[in-house]
Amino acid sequence: MTELDTSTASTTAAEKQAHWSTLQESGTIRGILFMLWIQRMFGRGFFNALLYPIMAYFFLVNRRARCASLEFLRTHAEKYPDYWQGKTPGYRDVFRHMYSFGQCILDKLLAWSTPINEQDFEITNEPLLAEFMAKTNGQLIIGSHLGNLEYCRGFVQRYKARTINALVYDQHSANFVSAMQKINPESRIHIYQVNELDIPLILQLKTKIDNGEWLFIAGDRIPLSGEARTVTVDFLGRPAQLPIGPYMLAKVLQCEVQLMFSYRSAHKIVFELVPFAQQVTLPRKDGGAQLHAYAQQYANALEQQAARAPLQWFNFYPYWASSRSANESAEESAR
């Protein structure tokens, strides 16, 4: 995640331990490319079968992800019990959750390496999407780690004249980004691996927006500087910290802001564009309240997606302020 602070902020040891960026990367470039080779040689069915023992291994050895998944699913069930038909999610659901993530990794690779087949997509509000695709002005697009943001990028890239820029912090996923760039080196998607947004980069991004390019950024993870650059919002009925960086960046860029969500549902890819703001404004008075309002607006839209597809939630780390203690209690009660 990125934010607009041009200074280097320090974090405590406890904050670093809890931060998503401390999660170590799993897999290598060869391993990631091998997954794609398996799918191409033997088909999706064989890949899905091979994925079971692989994800079983990660299920067994990755306690932190296991706890985070259990907490998220149970929090979701408390607010949306109808989805779970009254049952309490357990470890079988945690494994299904992780298995969905394994499939998502392949989907990400396919989104970069194969042409987008529109018949595979279920478009929510097609007239709105067509209107958006016809725009020629630069756009800031805020995504999430729910589902597969690569499908959003790949879908809009069918317009070959469109240049897409993605801001990512990928110290923990450098191998994955490298693999995607090897798969499709001529892609018009440009990846910016950044720790924070400094003034030269902001000016560069402003030029890109002015030239009609699109900029993708995720809005659902605490920035590297910790909770100092966040606001507290309600998400699934619990207080969570979300970054203010996307909205501060939008204020500087002075462009339209959209939300995009894409996730797998059975054999279809659900794709939804959600208009967010014609222009982000932050008044000198009550600017903090307006930042909170923007972050809550995003959280509400994100929750609507999570309500329909909880197994597509791919933040496998303690997400809420009380997550560490809650995770431990949840795992104890599931035994």
Image: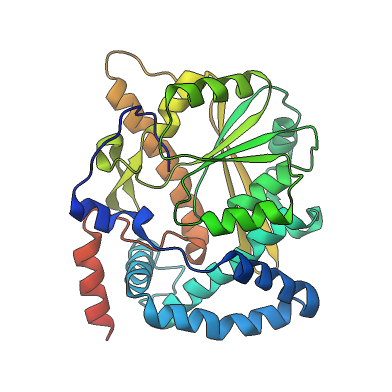
| Residue 237 sits above or below residue 73 on the image | above
Relative side of 139 to 232, left or right? right
Image quarter hosting the C terminus = bottom left
Toward which corner of the image does residue 93 lie, by quadrant? bottom left
Residue 214 place in picture, x, y as percent: 64, 31
**Whole-percent x and y of residue 6?**
35, 27
Left or right of residue 232: residue 277: right
Q: Is residue 37 visible from the viewing direction of this image?
A: yes
- The answer to which image quadrant residue 40 occupies is bottom right
In the rendered view of the protein, which quadrant contains the N terminus? Answer: top left
Outermost residue on the top side: it is: 284
Q: Nearer the viewer, residue 144 or 239?
A: 144
The residue positioned 66% from the left and 45% from the top of the image is 153
Is 26 placed above or below 138 here? Answer: below
Residue drawn 29% across and 26% down?
289
Residue lying at 27% horizontally and 19% vertically, measured from the top left: 286
Write the residue at 71% across / 60% down.
110
Which residue is at the front of the view, 15 or 85?
15
